[in-house]
Image (spheres, rainbow, N blue to C red):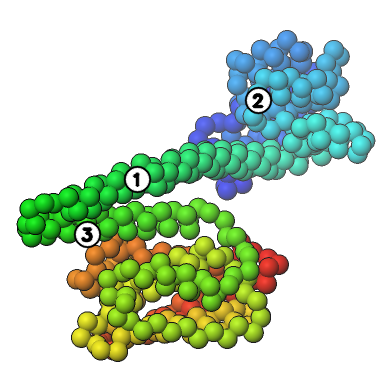
Amino acid sequence: MKRNGSLRMEKKLKILMLEDREEDAGLINRTLTKDGVDYTSQNVDTREEFVRALEQYNPDVILSDHALPQFNSLEALKICKQSGFKGPFILVTGTVSEEFAVSCLKLGADDYVLKSNLARLPSAIFNSLRQRQMESKRKKAESALRKQNDELVKINKELDSFVYSVSHNLRAPLMSVLGLVQLAKMNDKNDDMIYDMYFDKIEQSIHKLDNTLKEILDYSRNARSEVKIERVNLQQLMEDMFERLHYMEGSENIKKQITMKEHVPFFSDPQRLSVICNNLVSNAIKYRSPGEKNQFIHIDITVNENSAKIHFEDNGIGIPKDFQSKIFDMFFRATERSEGAGLGLYIVKEAIDKLHGTIEVESSPSQGTIFKMEIPNHSGASQPS
């Protein structure tokens, strides 16, 4: 096509004309040739010829008169639909009512051109081809999107199976091994310290692996489960957390203090808040300063109608400034003392993002760390999307 350069054809346009008057077919050909359209054409005027041409000529565009002796454009349009023809169908006819033209368009015609205004025919063909191209691209994009969605559904089902496997098929036998180790320690009659050392190392490795599995489960639940808003008793949540962490090594040497200023009820996702707080406090216990006599963890909470501001402060080993921008990255470990998989603070950040909250860190080596969180108060009326 020489005109309308935005639509380029790699081959000549094949036009099928349904027209019973040779002079009208000649006028159409002269109009297209004069306008520089690069095409070939075939003219038919019966149903049988039209059906055969659709199959054998394989046209790109159909130009159809409305009234033929034993055939009409509406029947031709119906045949096109049944045959799966994908190109434009343009009505080229004499005077017709506006109601009839609109009816044809609703039935699937791409455009209509009056024979008294054939100068508009080339642009009608180009525009119809362009619209068909755009429609084809849209359908391909929708098909690709559906395929991706189907793949995501499949992946989600596989992830469900994986989470189930981690929860039941891995952790359950791990706990069985731990129980057997503890029984073996109790039944060791030789009082041999070397075996106690081996058992302790096995026990430590089991706990380490179990903590990693818990982190994987926390990550999966946060990524895949919906936010569930309900009233949160922050005081109780903190006390339950300290109770769970009571048996962590070193926990008994740390003074724990909670300051609560709850001016209004707080509504959020208690499960995610529990995961967030558990990770932050367990890190504070894990990375305490052994030489510090007055080890502490202070939690300061202020709740208003807009948000809950929760600050966690400790006087542990602290975080070097160069590492502070990376601590929320997956698998990042800021110290050689880290025994986990590097998922804890990553999960914290992901969970806070799910709640549409924020978290900042202030830390100095050998001085301690402060994590400052702000979580929206949803007041039981709405949930973050």
User: How far is the residue under mark 2 from the one under mark 1?
Assistant: 60 Å
Q: Residue at x 82, y 39 (%)?
A: 117
- The answer to whether 137 is drawn above or below residue 60 in the figure is below
Question: What amino acid type should be assigned to the residue bearing mark 2?
Answer: Phe
User: How far is the residue under mark 3 from the one under mark 2?
Assistant: 70 Å
**Which comes sooner in the sequence, label 3 or label 2?**
2
Neighbor class of circle 2 (other Cα within 10 Å; few <14, some 14-19, many 20+) is some
**Which comes sooner in the sequence, label 3 or label 1?**
1
Please name which of the two marks, 3 or 2, marks the residue nearer to the observer: 3
Q: Secondary structure at mark 3?
A: helix
Q: Which mark is residue 65?
A: none
Can residue 219 be seen here? The reply is: yes
Question: What amino acid type should be assigned to the residue bearing mark 3?
Answer: Gln
Frontmost residue, 205 versus 62: 205
Q: Secondary structure at mark 1?
A: helix
- Residue 103: give x, y in percent of width and height: 86, 34
**Which comes sooner in the sequence, label 2 or label 1?**
2
- The answer to whether 269 is drawn above or below residue 21 in the figure is below
Q: Residue at x 34, y 62 (%)?
A: 343
User: How far is the residue under mark 3 from the one under mark 1?
Assistant: 17 Å
Q: Which residue in the protein does label 3 denote?
A: 204
Frontmost residue, 292 versus 72: 292
Please name which of the two marks, 2 or 1, marks the residue nearer to the observer: 1
- The answer to whether 188 is drawn above or below residue 367 in the figure is above
Question: What amino acid type should be assigned to the residue bearing mark 1?
Answer: Ala
Q: Which mark is residue 85?
A: 2
Residue lying at the far top of the rendered structure? 48
Q: Which residue in the protein does label 1 denote?
A: 172
